[in-house]
Image (tube, coloured by chain):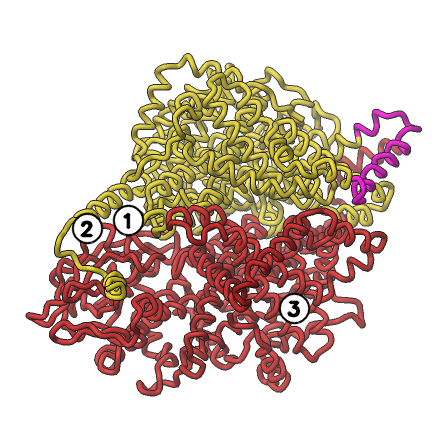
Chain colours: A yellow, B red
Amino acid sequence: MTAPTARTTATAAQSTTAPASAAQAAETRRRVPAPTGPIPVPPSGAPRLDVGLVTEMLLGDWADVRRAARESARRPELHRPEDVTVAEHRARVLEQMHLLAAEEMSHRMLPESLGGPNDNGGNVAAFAELVVADPSLQIKAGVQWGLFTSAILQLGTAEHHERWIPDAMSLKTPGAFAMTEIGHGSDVQSLATTATYDPETEEWVIRTPFRAAWKDYLGNAALHARAATVFARLITRGVDHGVHCFYVPVRDEDGNLLPGVRSEDDGPKGGLNGIDNGRLAFDDVRIPRTNLLNRYGDVAPDGTYTSPIDSPGRRFFTMLGTLVQGRVSLDGSANRAAQLALHIAITYASQRRQFTGASATEETVLLDYQSHLARLLPKLAATYAGAFAHEELLHAFDDVFSGRGDSPEAREDLETLAAALKPTSTRLALDTIQECREACGGQGFLAENRLVGLHQDLDVYATFEGDNTVLLQLVSKRLLADYTGELRSIDRAGIGRYIAQRAETLSRRHTPWNRLVQSAADAGRPRRSSESLRLPEFQEQMLSERARVKVEEVALALRPAAGKEPAEAAAIVNKHQVELLDAARAHADLVRWRAFSSAVGAVADDGTRAVLTDLRDLFGLTVIHDDLAWFLLDGMMSLQRGRTVARDIRRLLWRLRPHALDLVAAFDLQPEHVRAPIALGAERERQAEAAAHARSERARADAPISEKALKRTHRKG
Amino acid sequence: MTAPTARTTATAAQSTTAPASAAQAAETRRRVPAPTGPIPVPPSGAPRLDVGLVTEMLLGDWADVRRAARESARRPELHRPEDVTVAEHRARVLEQMHLLAAEEMSHRMLPESLGGPNDNGGNVAAFAELVVADPSLQIKAGVQWGLFTSAILQLGTAEHHERWIPDAMSLKTPGAFAMTEIGHGSDVQSLATTATYDPETEEWVIRTPFRAAWKDYLGNAALHARAATVFARLITRGVDHGVHCFYVPVRDEDGNLLPGVRSEDDGPKGGLNGIDNGRLAFDDVRIPRTNLLNRYGDVAPDGTYTSPIDSPGRRFFTMLGTLVQGRVSLDGSANRAAQLALHIAITYASQRRQFTGASATEETVLLDYQSHLARLLPKLAATYAGAFAHEELLHAFDDVFSGRGDSPEAREDLETLAAALKPTSTRLALDTIQECREACGGQGFLAENRLVGLHQDLDVYATFEGDNTVLLQLVSKRLLADYTGELRSIDRAGIGRYIAQRAETLSRRHTPWNRLVQSAADAGRPRRSSESLRLPEFQEQMLSERARVKVEEVALALRPAAGKEPAEAAAIVNKHQVELLDAARAHADLVRWRAFSSAVGAVADDGTRAVLTDLRDLFGLTVIHDDLAWFLLDGMMSLQRGRTVARDIRRLLWRLRPHALDLVAAFDLQPEHVRAPIALGAERERQAEAAAHARSERARADAPISEKALKRTHRKG
């Protein structure tokens, strides 16, 4: 498991010596329209966030790359169109792709051997910024370079690189990544397409044996792909060596399907309609022997199979490891999309007024309502946590993919971390965007204000590149394995004793007596127990214990499965599946909390650190609050203390209220990224005009008097 | 407050004597494709649901109306198109509207005086069924007949009815309901458009004083409306009598805007793109004096204002009461949409297979995974609860609007019930549709499988016709008023004592001692405490106490606001807004649980009652589980008992598993309603073909042997 590190320390320290960027950030801040009323500023002497500093922290170690990508994403020619047909949107995105290709958008991913800088982290960092231009463009770029080209790069060898990568990079060969089949998505091991070697002609015969084995949901497959990296079971000399990847041309120069290749269009989708997703099937399509991407397995002209990895299982998972790039990319993109949604909703909420209450003449700004703060600020806190955790994931990815820190353990850690962060960040992004859309009322439903489009496009992030449920299962399996490993480190005789001890500890937690002592200790000291919730040590303990105990409980519950027949064992595991997924989520929460804390800990500026600490606390306490029943039932928290959690969260909401605009300003979203009229001054102008009208009406001698006021006067008279 | 009644009793009893419909339901059931594997049926002797009976229960008291509307919704000419531009979709829906108008779709709403049956309940019941055809069509019909025509009917008098209703019904006059302004949606009282009476010409002068006062989001406003019912402040003789409704022609026969009327197009939206939503503004537009819809307020030729309701506040809320129809309609429609989503996702989940585990040769059906049951069945249970509660709301609405049970109290009860159910059912529908879409993976993202379109179209149900947050606030205000009324019934001297008592009771709940006794009582009897969770008395007590205590706690917390300056009082209320909304939701949960229980209690068939009781328990326990920390902290549940809730829910999931298909079959959704290929046999056929292929491969002598198996053999040999 990749332990969260203090990498952000360096970032934060650097940022204080980056005046140009700070100035840029200050400029951003000026462009954020001010609300009509007085901006709620903290009382003088109270902490204040240094927006420029936080912008730098969020830009992270690939700041220059991100800045350039943000600059690029401002261009109207890359933006998502509204109200176009699927065909029009696809055509537009293809054009945009050629623009990106001409600018060598993905050049950073290439290794030195191909003339590139081997900057995998930078490549993914730049990619994430594209989401604010058009998620369709982003994902189509991901298909072309992150999947199709990457497959050639990661699974092929030098000859393949030379033959195919230049045209893939330049988009001369648009390609499809033909892994998923209708019948099997996340279960790649069960793919049914076959590639059978024919030693007579030294060719592979690619076959789709039945309807469910059609490749499906492939970007570029419906229209644009000229070639595909096809995953199929490699069969030679009567032996099925499992899934390998083959380079298969599918269309000629004029776009006509090659003989034996069939294609279908997936048609309109819930979003991402700028991508021509479709299906491919192969009727005994023949390709040369050397079209096998042979880094991890090869076949000699006579059909002899060889592989540098002896175990078929390990070989398969090594090949699949290339998929992690997609997950890393989606984690970052989901986070960036959530930032955009929060920028729009929080800006609007700080200008939009509705209902009087606090004043007879002036209506209340939405963000001054407790429920509005409660729906937006915890999501803002989680998005910050997600940004810092993503930076750590990006480093782990860069270390492995650059080869600098590549080892089986590092790969496994990276895969687990990506499998934990991708499902939880895409979930957070979807929930955040939806909450933001509803928080903007009718305006939020208009396409021009972006939020509905973001939700539609990001919707599929939850189920592609590894379905969220399946990924969380992977994480929990790894956590269980780690736990079992821990057991194994104890000598044989000790295991039984150890398990008995743990079981006893857990069962003791389930009695009220233990808890009682805690309650008594807390009793009469609500202030102290409330203060302790804000202590990082307390949050760390709660969140790490929760992550650990959840794994432990499942591990103990699954003990009866050991030694059982597969069917019976599977049934036992299935009875605890919800808990398994829950344990994986608890792990992801912990990773994010630690990343946030380590970033906060490295901030030198007192005001900034104070505000970010509040935000980190809001994140930590919200996680605890959302699972409070578990903490209470497990005896990890006394009822006395449990009662203070909600109250503390509410206090944090009001403490953070004056910093809400600063916190979204640090996301460094320029007007050309935002593009939502309600967050670019339209609402502010309307409010100002209405307020001016109300003032002039009040000043007018002959303004109508209200019937209500009249009746009051009559009664008094 | 409308107390849940046992109306469903009659429904259930009737259904047993409706053989034609039972046959129809059986037919429906036959059409639901069977899964490839053995259908999980309960062991012989175990309870079995009578699908026909439950279909009848859900059809409710307006069964014939619903049946006819379902038949109508099967017609392809009414279905939502895919991949069309906004303009094309709008044109199509306008055509469909003419079809519905020709069939006198909304004739039922008309009173006897206009030749109608005055069947308001039936009118709304039929309306709800339209959602499965195209939500755009449904809402455009709602705008025309439920809002525009209804405003004339409810707020106008006989002369208005004769002059305008026939053309509104026939769609000769497409109309807009011009209430909401850009600046004020849910806060109708603050609308800024003015209608100033000019006694010289005996005309009203309609004026939009500033940009935020433009009418916005109005269906029909961008293109089709010829007239609008405009809500504006009535000003005569220098007095502002507050918001009234005026009939204002806006376009001529050729569709050109009339002088002084301006219009803008809202453009593409997140969904419902078949409706031409837009804005309207009025530059001193003059209309005759008699265009004031004068049921609740009138002006004589000389400008004298009169009203049958003296209090301006009460008059306003009486006029606004007509809005309740929209909320009742959305409650039913949201429920029907959730039924459709669940039908699709549960059918697919019972056929789709992924990953082996339980068997070496056959993959596991999705619905046999615990996490899949856990994501879908609680939503199914809540949707059933929502259907039964909606039937009660429909009766309350019908009683009031038919005039049979109209009284200020009944209206207020109806409005509170609608304000509680609409936000919670639209929330449930959106969450359910999203869960269903994700549960269907990549297939769920394809437009052809309907789920993404349903989410897009229903998205705005959460914020229109009364924003969900605002409606829940209305409910909590009413609940607080009821509570205060309860206090008032105690004599003056007793109030202080009473409050002190309640406060003491509550504070005692917050100490652990009270709880301790409960724990001790439960201790060592987990079986018994688990059983008691399934007792309806227990659930009733938990849910009703929760609803009551949440109001009580807020009421006590708000006591310091009494007698304070408005600004200070508002600040205190605002500090408890989240709790206020929470109390309203708790009330809605209770209403649904009681409606479900009363429906279940009336079932004569043992098997059906047993299954529905499990489903009701799943609903009740899920509500308790989702708020478990509150029950524990408030001392309403011991930790001992709290620990059994999740376990009991899991048991219920498995008990209900064999009935999942029956439960969705009772929704009576025909293939022409469903239209999603994955729920109409496509997946089943693919699975059957793949299974046949696997069987023939296993039988083939020269089938390739896997490298893994080969290695195992070698090792053994």
Mark 3, Cα crowd under 10 Å, few <14 / some 14-19 / many 20+, is some
Say left or right for A409 vs A423. right
Q: Are marks 1 and 2 in contact (CB under 8 Å)?
A: yes
> Magenta segment range?
A485-514
Q: Residue at the top extreme?
A: A17
Name the residue rendered at 39%, 69% in the picture: B77
Which residue reaches farthest right? Answer: A493
SS of the residue at dot 1?
A: loop
Chain under callout 3: B
Q: Which residue is mark 3?
A: B662
Where is residue B315 shown, x and y percent of the image?
31, 70
- Mark seen at residue A361: 1
Element class at badge 3: helix
For label 2, the residue is: A698
| Residue depicted at 35% across the width and 83% down the height | B111
- Mark 2 lies on a secondary structure that is helix
